Each structure stands twice: as C-alpha cells, then as structure tokens.
Image: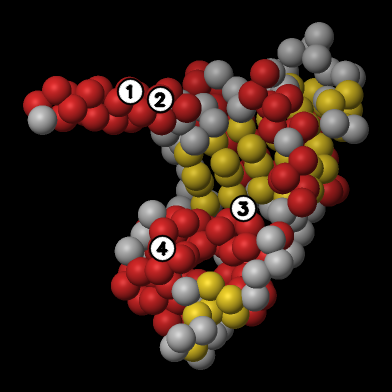
Amino acid sequence: MPNSDRISKPTSRRMSLYLRALQLQLNQGKAAISSKELGDQTGVKDAQVRKDLACFGSLGRPGVGYRIGDLHHQLRRLLGMDQTWKTVLVGAGNIGRALLAYPRFRNEGFDFVAAFDHNKKDVGKKIAGLCIQPMEELKKTVKQKHAQMGLIAVPPDAANKVAQSLVSAGVRGILNFAPIRLDLPKGIAVVNVDFTDALEQLAFEIRLSITEGKSV
C-alpha cells in the first residue's frame, strides 16, 4: 500500500477519476480493465495510468489488465474512502440544501451529522433528516459529534469567520463553496469549489472550439 503523504495532488485527483470509473465497471459486473480502457474513460493517457497504478504492485497483468475489485479496494484505502467521515454543513441556503439532499455523499462514506445557519428563519427547519441549528451551537456540536470535516456554503464575507470557527471546534478539513480564499492555519486541508470559475472555464472552452472551427 503506497504512502498517501508521498502522492501529489495531481496524482490524487487522477486516482479519484480512476475510482469513479472502476465503480461504474463494478456496477456493470466487469472483472478486469486495461490501462487503455481506464485511460479512455478518464481522459488520462494509458502510460500515465500505468505509472500512477504501479505503486500498487502486481494488480495489473499483461493481456488481462487490472483486477477491478482489488484495484477499487486499494484506491478507496488510499483516498481515505474506506472509513466514515463525520461531516457538518454551515449554510442552509440553496447550495447547502442541495448538498444535504445529495444521496451519493452518504453512499461514499460522508455522514452529515449536523447543519448550521445564522438565519433565524431557517433554524429549526429539517433538511434531509437534520434539524438546522444556530451558529452558537456549532463548537459544542462539532466536538460532541466528533466531526472531522466541514462544508461551507455561506456568502464570501462570512466564509473566513465560519472556517475559523470550524477549525477551533476541531474540524480537520474544509470543502469551501464560497468564492474566497480561506486564511487558515497550516495543517488544515482545504478544497475550494468555485462554480463561477468552472462556468468561466467552460465558456472559454466553448469560445475556443468555435474559434478553432471557424479557422479550419
């Protein structure tokens, strides 16, 4: 089993792509997959696939490919998906409600144990089985529930304060949906999800493809 501390972020992102593709293959009842097939399904060159997966040793066999079940198991362990992550959400607006209601999070081991919002009109409402709590209860609840992960879906001007409160309560990692950089202590894992940035990149790709089409 490779040491996850030695795996780069770009490699870990590719590992996530491989895991999603392997899950689809398992659902279809397949037993083996080649590096080319895995590359085609994830947009990664087959040479890079083989290089990434070489850290798992002899799971791949010439002429047969990778044993999907074994590789899927090893990738889940590597990415920390072989355990349950107790998670809290801050921000019960449109994005927050959609995140809580998304069933795949729980299927993948992310267990939402609490949700918070500063809006008193939302406090007390139930979303996906969770009663929205006031922000004043965040620190106590995070400690009681032993939450390790926090999702932030609040306006940009509130994001840093919320993130600092989560860290102070003991959260070790944050998924940030607010379009702002979080100023947090070293050692706290942060992943930013910026929908506007993704849409801008999509618009650029569309414009580029149209321009290239016209120039042919």
- Any mark on residue 203, and which? 1
Which of labels 4 and 3 is toward the front? 4
Earlier-in-chain disc, 2 versus 4: 4
Contact between labelled residues 2 and 1, with CB atoms less than 8 Å apart: yes
Q: CA distance from mark 1 to mark 4?
A: 26 Å
Which of labels 2 and 4 is toward the front? 4
In the displayed structure, would residue 205 be above or below residue 36?
above
Quadrant for residue 48, please give it: bottom left
Which of labels 1 and 3 is toward the front? 1
Where is the C terminus found, in terms of image quarters?
A: top left
Left of 147 or right of it: where is 16?
left
Identified by mark 1, the residue type is Ala
Earlier-in-chain disc, 2 versus 3: 3
- Taking the spot 65% from the left edge, 75% from the top edge, the residue there is 31
- Taking the spot 89% from the left edge, 19% from the top edge, the residue there is 124
Give the residue number, with chain letter if any, for mark 3.
172
Observer-nearest of 47 and 152:
47
Quadrant for residue 44, please give it: bottom left
Q: CA distance from mark 1 to mark 3?
A: 34 Å
Q: Secondary structure at mark 3?
A: loop
Give the residue number, with chain letter if any, for mark 4.
39
Identified by mark 2, the residue type is Leu
Place of residue 99 in the rendered image (x, y in percent of width and height, measured from the top left): 69, 32
Q: CA distance from mark 2 to mark 3?
A: 29 Å
